[in-house]
Image: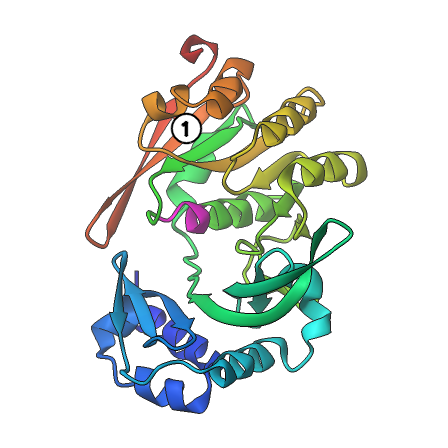
Amino acid sequence: MDRDYMVARFDRAIKLLPYGLREKIRKLDKESRASTEEIRLRTGKAPTVLIGGREREFSDVPVTRADLDMLMDIATQVSGHAVQSSMINGYITSTGGFRIGIGGSVYMKDGAVGGYRNITSAAVRISRELLGIGSGLAGQLFENGIFRSTLIVSPPGCGKTTLLRDLIRIISDRGVRVSLVDERGEIAAVFDGKPQFDVGTHTDVLEGCPKAQGITMMTRAMNPQIIAVDEITDIKDVEAMINASNCGIGFLATAHAERLGDLKSRPVYRSLLHADIFKNIIYINKSEDRRTYKIERTGAEND
């Protein structure tokens, strides 16, 4: 990954911070700025950056509630009501495609989360777009011109979402209709009605909707050839995928695991394998800053 690009994304992300915190975090060395995955703020605690899975303080001055209020004002352009539906899911997406996770006190309305009474912590995730990392893989996902449903597998932090995004872009730009069910807003990062990341010219995005419901909605409404989703976690997702697959729709999805054996040991993924939806599994291996990809054919023999 290009260091200058990584630093540039960091520098753009910190524009969401209040001035005092912004000036403190600017003092990090270039390597730390390039490697930062998240910026974490907690009321009454020192602010930190997440690097290599560990948090590191970048100031000894505790975060105040005013700091968090200012962060939210900057991120929402002082229009919190415009992102309320996203906030009740625990996050917002700001311009530039940065997702901000939110902690605090919520209030309930009609049995569901209605909003926040106050915000006590925030995690600014620095997502990075890597165009072209899927170029050598995309063509291998088709057989006789027909897309073979593909599952991207790796442990957390290895770049599943980044690869998924690039494969969506490449396949979509080849003229294939892709429906992206972007439940957490991390793939397309729609802001003010426009994706902040390139997800292709023939991609339709449904953001903020639970995957199971979104799969059903896009199947009925958008006539997709492929549906893309990130992080399958629920049996309802599997049921919706099986129903859509029976309609001839292909899937491009991700899952947390190290190998096929991990998937087979979990009831949710066992159901997927048993249904024979996925014909390809892409494994991501990470060594320091290098990632390698391996495609493995799968099918009913893996029940």
Question: Observer-nearest residue: 153 or 174?
Answer: 153
- Residue at 52% across, 64% down: 102
Q: Is residue 3 visible?
A: no
Q: Is residue 198 visible?
A: yes
Question: Observer-nearest residue: 56 or 64?
Answer: 64
- Residue at 42% across, 79% down: 14
Residue range of the region highlighted in magenta in the rendering: 159-163
In the image: residue 70, left or right of residue 128:
right
Placement of 228 over or under 198, stated as above or below: above
Residue picked out by circle 1 = 281
- Residue at 68% across, 74% down: 80
Q: Which residue occupies the extreme left position in the image?
A: 288
Q: Position of residue 266 (x, y in %)?
A: 43, 23
Question: Observer-nearest residue: 110 or 188?
Answer: 110
- Residue at 55% across, 81% down: 69
Q: Is residue 160 inside the magenta stretch?
A: yes
Decide whether the magenta segment is chiefly helix, strand or loop. helix
Residue type at mark 1?
A: Ile
Q: Is residue 247 inside the magenta stretch?
A: no
Q: Position of residue 256 (x, y in %)?
A: 40, 37
